Image (cartoon, rainbow, N blue to C red):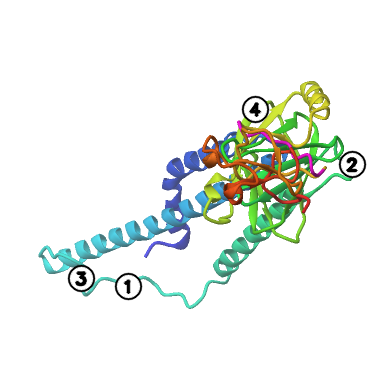
Amino acid sequence: MPPVRERFGSLSKWLPVTAPLALALVALGCSSTMGLPDSATTQGDSVVEIWRVFLVLAALVAGLIYVLTCYVIISSLRRRRKANAAAAAEVGEVTRGLSSDSPIPRQHQYNTRLEIFYTAVPLLLVGFLFVFSFSRGAVLTDVQPQPDLNVTALGFQWGWQFIYPDHNVTLAGDPTTPPTLMLPVGRTVHFTIKSNDVIHSFWVPDFLEKRDMVPGVVNNVDVNVKAPGEWTGRCAEYCGFNHWMMTFQAKAVPAAEFDQWIGVAKTRPQPIIAGVRAVTSTSSSTAVPITAAPPTVTNPPITARNGTTIVDSPSTQGSGVGSGGPGAGTTTPVASTTTAVPAGPGAAP
């Protein structure tokens, strides 16, 4: 049997194959997101770093295991061939398979240095990954005491509402058009994330992070968008039958353009509701997201004998059934001339 130095020296034959592969993996890990989308935020860059380091180390460990496995298989086959050739030369005939006279490799009860090596290296790797993940994760959970902009993200079944409390601006959507979250580039945006009904999840895939929205729990996250762009956000937690409807648009614009937009938005009636069914509640200063189509009123209000303000329902218009008559039970009562708006989270009773 060849000495130990000879056996380990034969590993040098694998270096021309393994060294370029290892260098290629390291270079790829340092210069690419390795399958992840480009991060739209500085916080998302930490996610890319974690992904890159874990993937490169996993590939190197897997490559080492495959190389050692192939080495054992190949060296075992070579040993068998040599043993068979020696046995055939002794008996004068060619034999197939492993000869019964083939020498068994020398057995070792223990190898202290090797055991210390394969115990210490995994511990060091796990310790490094733990410290690295903790340090990068701290960037994702860190919040600034004085951010440039505060935004409250409210999720409900099945829509979104974005409130800019420092500017008294509220954005909402209707069942056909999701709201658009406006963000400034290069500024720290602090999100206060809430839910008043069931568990939702605030997620913009290009931000490479998300936050759960748990009723009774307030989560916080800071975001610094690096460049202008538009992305689709969605709820990442199944929240009911119409979970698929919980989408919104996130749009980042230069800081000067955002300042101009927020200056105009604060002068408009609140909430600012996207879509063809844009209706503003006049019964409460609290933003009321639209969750259903408002009723259609085509007739002017008519005062009944008892003083109640009513209008004919669409189904009875033109039929001669009016207020105070036999068809009064089919009319739609309205408390005032303001169009009724379905109640949503935060709506006044």
> 275 or 42: nearer the eye?
275
| Among the two numbered marks 4 and 3 on one chain, the one whose residue lies closer to the N terminus | 3
Rendered-image quadrant of the C terminus = bottom right
Find numbered disc 1 in the image and state the secondary structure of the residue it sits on. Answer: loop
Look at the picture and state if 281 lies above or below 10: above
- The answer to whether 156 appears left or right of 89 in the picture is right
Kindly report the distance in space between the C-alpha atoms of the residues bearing marks 1 and 2.
72 Å
For badge 2, the amino acid type reads Gln
Q: Are marks 2 and 4 in contact (CB under 8 Å)?
A: no
Q: Which mark is residue 146?
A: 2
* Disc number lying in front (1 or 2): 2
Is 61 part of what is drawn in magenta?
Answer: no
Kindly identify the residue that appears in the image at 76 percent across and 43 percent down: 287
- The answer to whether 272 appears left or right of 234 in the picture is right
Circle count: 4
Q: Which residue is mark 3?
A: 99
Kindly report the distance in space between the C-alpha atoms of the residues bearing marks 2 and 4.
25 Å
Look at the picture and state if 166 lies above or below 132: above
Q: Which residue is mark 4?
A: 229
| Among the two numbered marks 1 and 2 on one chain, the one whose residue lies closer to the N terminus | 1
Residue 265 lies, in percent from the top left, at 79, 28
Kindly report the distance in space between the C-alpha atoms of the residues bearing marks 2 and 3.
79 Å
Look at the picture and state if 349 lies above or below 30: below
The residue segment tinted magenta is 276-284
